Image: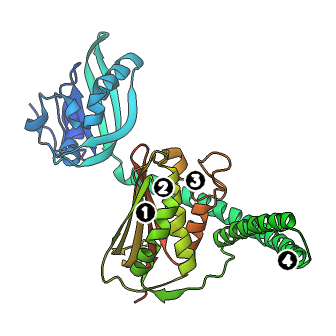
Amino acid sequence: MTPHPTGDLGDESQQFGLLVNSVTDYAIYMLDPRGVIRTWNPGGERIKGYRKDEVVGTNYARFYTPEDIATDVPARNLAIAANEGRYAGEGWRLRKDGSRFHASVVIDPVRVDGVLVGFAKITRDVTERYLAQEQLRSAQHELLQAQKMEAIGKLTLGLAHDFNNLLSVVTNCLDLISAQPHGEVSDKYIRTALRSVERGALLTRQLLTFGRGHELAPERFDTGKAIRDMHDMLQRSAGDAVAVELDVAGDLPSVNLDRGQLDSAILNLVCNSRDAMPSGGCIKITVRLQTERHPDDPHQEPGRFLCITVADNGEGIAPDDQARIFEPFFTTKTVGRGSGLGLSQVFGFTSQSGGFIRVDSTPGSGTSVALYYPVAE
């Protein structure tokens, strides 16, 4: 018998075996009709970390996450392949060391004379592609959100200036009227009108702060002492049914902030927490010095930030609403209970001060809003 010349791959079955065993970027293996692994290639070992003797004879469901196993995803995927001629999809899978990777999976039924004898399964690790797509989607969403907020800010700024001019005219007219002789009834109406004008002026300041048209007046002060001095006022605003607790760290550095705007921001958060606890509860204000990386500049070195956290055990915020809470005029409160500008003021002031905000809320468990302000070295 003449020997095969050098480089001859042999018959078709030998060629197929060499092909499958030479592939390392794909896990290619056979399953029996119940999902038990019958073959294993080097690609499976590279991607999933198991040697051939560790997996052959075991069910392929071992590669799925506990969440998928609980909902019977492995058996459902085999059923789809058997009934529809193929299953193709993506999802998270587990390696031998317990780490997760995002897999692109194809399962084809193998039939002999029309009888299902098993499945051919191909798995590819697409984690890098998946994460890149997620980062792209996140960046696109953040860009759209920034453009929307910028447009709303410009509109708000223009409206606030016009409204402020109208309030000035009304205030001057009321001042002139009050200087003229008038009776007790007229004096009552004038005072009522002036209080309404003051509320309108507060609304204008909130609009200007959100639209970044309000000039801040930063000053250096002890934030811990300032918040302790606010405690009585915050407790009165929260009401008797809500307890306001302070947890202020000692030896906090002084910061350069607009103190009036900071007081207003904390008061806004406390009032929101109070409204989220109609039956009473607890609001805890924590002040700490933390080292953080600014989310708007992830490549920047971490810096020192003063973190003021206002947390409650109230109703929480619905997930669909959490992305909109800083939009002007957006509110989950009933008509007449809020203008939807309180958190916009907090957002505008914090952004203008070079800081950022993190919100953590679970419906039924409460809300925590953390304000981060840079500490000048």
Q: Which residue matches tag 2? A: 273
- Position in image of residue 38 (x %, y %): 16, 27
Q: Residue reaching furthest front?
A: 184
Q: Which mark is nearer the camera, 2 or 4?
A: 4
Q: Which mark is residue 9?
A: none
**Above or below 196: residue 364:** above
In the image: residue 303, left or right of residue 151: left
Task: Pinpoint residue 177: horizontal percent, then vertical percent.
Answer: 90, 74
Nearest the viewer among 167 and 96 is: 167
Q: Which residue is mark 1?
A: 310
Marks 2 & 1, CB-CB < 8 Å contact: yes
Residue at 57% of width from left, 61% of height from top? Answer: 343
Image quadrant containing the C terminus: bottom left
- The three-letter amino acid code for the residue at tag 1 is Val
Residue located beneath label 3 in the image: 324
The answer for how far apart the CA atoms under marks 1 and 3 are is 19 Å
Q: Sequence-wise, which precedes: disc 3 or disc 4?
A: 4
Q: Nearer the viewer, mark 3 or mark 4?
A: 4
Local packing at callout 3 (Cα closer than 10 Å; few below 14, some 14-19, many 20+) is few
Q: Which mark is residue 175?
A: 4
User: Image point 52% across, 51% down: which residue?
Assistant: 275
Q: x%, y% of residue 123? A: 30, 39
Secondary structure under badge 1?
Answer: strand
Q: Amino acid at mark 2?
A: Ser
CB contact under 8 Å: marks 4 and 1: no
Q: Residue at x 66, y 66 (%)?
A: 150
Quarter of the image where the N terminus is located: top left
- Report if the CB atoms under discs 3 and 4 are less than 8 Å apart: no
The local crowd at label 2, few if under 14, some if 14 to 19, many if 20 or more residues have their Cα within 10 Å, is: many
Query: How far apart, in angstroms, are the residues tagged by discs 3 and 2?
Result: 17 Å
Instruction: Quote the CA–CA distance across marks 4 and 1.
Output: 40 Å
- Neighbours of disc 4 within 10 Å: few (<14), some (14-19), many (20+): few
